[in-house]
Amino acid sequence: MASSLPILIFWLLPVCFALKATITQSPRYLMGNPRSEAIMTCEQLTTDHENMYWYYQNRGQGLELVASMLRGQEPDYGGDYKSGYKMDRSRADKHSSLRIQSPAATDQGVYFCASSDAQ
């Protein structure tokens, strides 16, 4: 039993530290129109992380990286998200937006914003 205690603590520590980061994302729900952009925003409230990320999840599937951006650099786009998507980051760097330029039915799903100091 004593040998499993350090492993248990190791797995709990990242969870405890992660709870200190607060990110808000809006809007909560968004109905897209193929003739206009769909825009989602994200703000780091309690952190000032170097990296910001946008993920997409389709029903019953795992997370897919849409885009990531290191402070002061251009965004990197994942796989199928190289065209039709645009990630921005504000000058204050605590805000990010994701634009879907011509939303289609295939874009339907859940989008998540995240931040991190690690790459």
Image (spheres, rainbow, N blue to C red):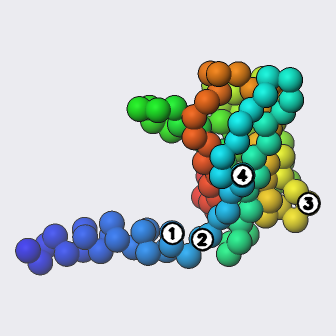
Look at 79% across and 36% down and name the residue there.
38
The extreme left residue here reads 1
User: What residue did someone put label 1 on?
Assistant: 18
Q: Please, what is the three-letter code of the amino acid marked with disc 1?
A: Ala
* Residue 57 appears in the rendering: yes
Mark 1–mark 4 CB contact (< 8 Å): no
Crowd tier of the residue under label 1, counting other residues whose Cα lies within 10 Å: few below 14, some 14–19, many 20 or above: few
Q: Please, what is the three-letter code of the amino acid marked with disc 4?
A: Pro
User: What residue did someone put label 3 on?
Assistant: 91
Please tell me which of labels 3 and 4 falls first in the chain. Answer: 4
Residue 111, image quadrant: top right
Q: Please, what is the three-letter code of the amino acid marked with disc 2?
A: Ala
User: What residue did someone put label 2 on?
Assistant: 21
Task: Work out whether residue 28 or residue 101 is closer to the camera in this orientation and state it.
Answer: 28
Look at 25% across and 68% down and name the residue there.
7
User: Label for residue 27?
Assistant: 4
Judged from the image, the secondary structure of the residue bearing numbered disc 2 is loop
